[in-house]
Image (cartoon, helix red, strand yellow):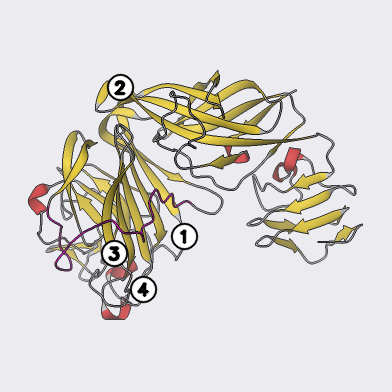
Amino acid sequence: MQTTIHLKSILLIFGLLSCSVANAQIPASAFSFSCIKTDTVVGCGQTCVTLSTKIPNIRALTGTYTVNRISAPEGCFRQYVSPAAPGTALGASNDDIYSSVINLPFNFPFYGAGYNSVVISTNGYISFDETKASAFSHYGMFSSGFGLVTYATGGAIPADLPNVLYDKALIMVPYHDIDIFASTSPGKQVKYELIGTAPHRRWVLSYYKIPLFLTSCNNLIENTSQLVLYEGTGIVEVFINSNQSCTGWNEGRSMIGMQDYDRANGIMAPGRAASDAPWGTVDMNEAWRFTPAEGATLFKRVELYDAGGQLVSTGSILDAGNGNYNATFNNVCIDSAGSYIVKSVYKNINNPLTEVYGTDTLNILKRPANASELIWTGSVSTQWENPLNWLCNTLPGSTSSVIINAGAAVVVNSNVTVNSVTVQPGASLIVNPGYNINVLSAPH
């Protein structure tokens, strides 16, 4: 029997590739393109499966970009490095100011130009315009006849990207008026650092527990985010751990987006524009990927390896739209539980004669088809009655031992009978009024 298993339904391990995989074809510093963390589906007695996942379609030119949210059931904040850990401090001497020129360790392509340095704003953005070094950095969010203002009055409206009111060649992560000199957050810091080895280096900028500006807003100190520039791909990623709003200043607005040097082209994350309603919470954990979208694709191949580093299969791709490919591996025969590595290979955007890689590790756990144990996966919804939410796409019955793992939320809208139910700490099982669960053996 052959079954299709999508990556959302497979336990993934993220970050850098495990050092136990010694095959030279998979570099230990390769990038990771996924951010799903907890979903597990068990192979249900099948002999061979089709594995499917989504990978970015990176293109050769940076005149335009796509933006995609990198999602996971509990959110995504990749944390290549902890934003709280020590790093190279920003060293700003005042509020609303840019840093001195900071050299990048690699050339980074951005909106059709290549850059080797940045300046960092104390208000949650960077610019590739070196002339702004140590200069004032704007903090307004509304446009008026006089430029940017911090409140909506006299016909002022939220200023989205692209916009000549903002500085040149910007990445906002997010842009909001923060106060790195407020005394309300003793552990606050802005830092940057380099991780990985060429050609898979990442330049990471972190804003950690930065208070919002204005005395009445200074107690909102959880604002934590990161910007990641990826060598060899032109990819920009923005990670938001916490983003708070204070309506007393800039109406509580903030923005995630980018614009070019000429301020004629720009892109914003959906729902994260200046014109969008104030957004964000503490521990929201979300991520956005901006991918070059112009010119020929840099994609070369996608491969599947076993845990020993041996090539199992070469995959096929299909355009999934908005800068993504669906990558598929057909007829992968799995005799027992094990780990597999998806390796996406691209031409280096700075040197097409070399390659860069993205890797993700899959763990597949096999079970007999007739196992009485049924595990909740929550693949499509919170509804108990949908078989697609259960292991093997099978609804529990009177002989089933139901397991609901930590983090899951399950809602029952019918009368059901099962042998047993185990609800792990951190999971919830809600039986709506008028219905019940009949448990034949002692419940857990």
Q: Quadrant of the C terminus?
A: bottom right
Disc assigned to residue 284? 1
Residue 305 lies, in percent from the top left, at: 54, 25
Which is more N-terminal, label 4 or label 2? 4
Which is more N-terminal, label 1 or label 2? 1
Mark 3 residue type: Gln
Q: Residues within 10 Å of mark 3 (few under 14, many from 20)?
A: many
Residue depth check, mark 1 versus mark 3: number of the one nearer the observer: 3
Q: Secondary structure at mark 4?
A: loop
Q: Quadrant of residue 260?
A: top left
Q: Secondary structure at mark 3?
A: strand
Q: Residues within 10 Å of mark 4 (few under 14, many from 20)?
A: many
Q: Residues within 10 Å of mark 2 (few under 14, many from 20)?
A: few
Tell me whether the residue at label 2 lies in contact with that at label 1, contact meaning CB atoms closer than 8 angstroms. no
Mark 4 residue type: Leu
Residue 196 lies, in percent from the top left, at: 34, 40
Q: How far separated are the C-alphas under marks 1 and 3? A: 20 Å
Disc assigned to residue 220? 4
Q: Secondary structure at mark 1?
A: loop
- Residue position for label 2: 354
Q: How far separated are the C-alphas under marks 2 and 3? A: 37 Å
Which is more N-terminal, label 4 or label 1? 4
